[in-house]
Amino acid sequence: MDVTQQQLWDVDAARSYDTPGTGMFAPDVLGPTVERLAELAAGKAALEFAIGTGRVGIPLAGRGVPVTGIELSEAMVARLREKADETALPVVIGDMATTVVPGRFGLVYLVFNTISNLRTQDEQVECFRNAARHLGPGGRFVVELWVPELRRLPPGQSATVWRSESGYVGMDVYDVLEQRAVSHHFHFDAEEAHRTGRTDAVRLGLSPHRYIWPSELDLMGRLGGFELESRHADWSGAPFTADSRSHVSVYRLPPS
């Protein structure tokens, strides 16, 4: 899939990204995320890679943590600017694997599977190195990432349905040779489609990823100079197990 990140995160994506009070904007999802990041910042400034429309950065700044963002999509930043100005939350346009912003931070964080948007292993390693460039001694890099669900693949098949609910179906199609996946997001009004037969009642969104195993992520951390400090299944601190579908991993630079 050759679509670029700029093409994926265009004006239409930015316009429909925010879902206040529901989905990843639901209080029970966003609250523990912000709480944990504020704790890990420990009174120091934070840098968010791929800050998007400010889902996490804005409430974290509201907690008194100085937040700066890096974001590739100008459309997403324009949406963020409707909610927070440059003084409240500065953002630099650029690639999270290479862009450097002024200042030194106590925390760099990358949430909601976004490191997998970098589609080569080299880029993902550079993302860790870029996090290290921005951190002082003892600084932390936090990554939230899903666990590839290859155990759920039926023999001879390449796709899994990971969510099915009223109005939405989420499906991942895997290329296990290249370690890639394309997430398919089907949004639809089932009653309208049945009543009218309209195919435009179904909207499909696609997002390509390079998936990363937890052990591979740890090796990327070591290449960037980090050590794994903790790993949990979610932001609330649930234990990470063989059945966990995602993880929040905290990497830390040596204190000196």
Image (cartoon, rainbow, N blue to C red):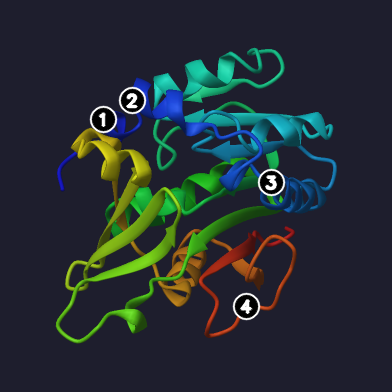
Mark 1 or mark 3, which has the lower sequence index?
1
Ranked by sequence position, the earlier of labels 3 and 4 is 3
Q: Nearer the viewer, residue 141 or 12?
A: 12
Residue ID for mark 2: 10
Q: Is tag 4's residue or tag 1's residue first in the polypeptide sequence?
A: 1
Between marks 3 and 2, how big is the CA–CA gap? 24 Å
Comes first in the chain, label 3 or label 2: 2
Q: Residue at x 28, y 36 (%)?
A: 201
Question: What residue is shown with label 1?
Answer: 7
Query: Where is the C terminus found, in terms of image quarters?
Result: bottom right
Label 3 Cα crowd, 10 Å radius (few <14 / some 14-19 / many 20+)? some
Label 4: which residue?
Answer: 240
Which residue is more in the foreground, 4 or 215?
Answer: 4
Query: Mark 1 near mark 2, Cβ–Cβ under 8 Å?
Result: yes
Percent coordinates x, y for residue 159 in the rendering: 24, 69
Whether label 2 touches label 4, CB < 8 Å: no
Quote the CA–CA distance across marks 2 and 4: 35 Å
Neighbor class of circle 2 (other Cα within 10 Å; few <14, some 14-19, many 20+) is some
Which residue has dot 3 on it?
A: 30
